[in-house]
Image (cartoon, rainbow, N blue to C red):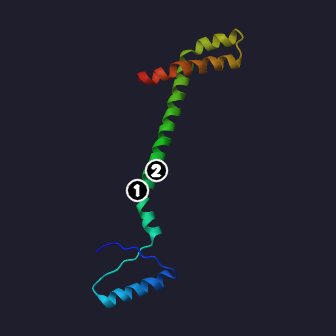
Amino acid sequence: MGTYPLCFSGSVRDVTARVRESVHAFNPRISLEFRLLSVRVEASLLQERLVALLSTLFGLLALVLAVTSLYGVVASSVTWRFHEIDIGIALGAGRGAVQGLVLWEVFMYGPSVHRIA
């Protein structure tokens, strides 16, 4: 029982056949299994790749939730201040000023809203 590395040059089939013949000549009850190093490395990295994929998916889910939450904060802010924004526009405030007012409030109070919720 055990794993033994086998370094060779030439065809894999030829070498494995010769090794199998030599071992079976010595003891026919010994069973042999040959696997290439690349196959073993691929199998050993399968779990790490799965963890990386799941981490990426959860990261994307967190990003979607954060964007949705930010949209909710902006929508709530605009809804609460709709009349104030309307009066500002009626008094001649430009589009940029109104957008700046809304974004300023989101960046100033948005993080505290998330801490409370």
Q: Quick check: 75 above or below 9?
A: above
Q: Residue 52 bears which disc, if any?
A: 2
Q: Helix, strand or loop at disc 2?
A: helix
Q: Quadrant of residue 107?
A: top right
Please state the horizontal and vertical placement of residue 22, each as a whole percent of the image: 37, 88
Q: Are marks 2 and 1 in contact (CB under 8 Å)?
A: no
Query: What amino acid type is highlighted by mark number 2?
Result: Ala
Q: Nearer the viewer, residue 23 or 36?
A: 23
Position of 84 with respect to 30 (left or right) is right
Please state the horizontal and vertical placement of residue 40, each as a whole percent of the image: 42, 67
Q: Nearer the viewer, residue 13 or 70?
A: 13
At horizontal 46% and vertical 21% (from top left) the residue drawn is 113
Q: Helix, strand or loop at disc 1?
A: helix
Q: Quadrant of residue 47?
A: bottom left
Position of 10 with respect to 25 (left or right) is right
Q: Quick check: 61 above or below 12?
A: above
Q: Quadrant of residue 23?
A: bottom left
Q: Quadrant of the N terminus?
A: bottom left
Give the distance between the C-alpha atoms of the residues marked 2 and 1, in whole angstroms. Answer: 9 Å
At horizontal 31% and vertical 72% (from top left) the residue drawn is 2
User: Disc 1 designates what residue?
Assistant: 47
Q: Earlier in the sequence, mark 2 or mark 1?
A: 1
Query: What amino acid type is highlighted by mark number 1?
Result: Gln
Please state the horizontal and vertical placement of residue 116, each as a whole percent of the image: 41, 21
Please state the horizontal and vertical placement of residue 87, each as a whole percent of the image: 64, 10
Crowd tier of the residue under label 1, counting other residues whose Cα lies within 10 Å: few below 14, some 14–19, many 20 or above: few
Q: Residue 1 bears which disc, if any?
A: none
Position of 104 with respect to 113 (left or right) is right
Q: Quick check: 74 above or below 86?
A: below
Crowd tier of the residue under label 2, counting other residues whose Cα lies within 10 Å: few below 14, some 14–19, many 20 or above: few
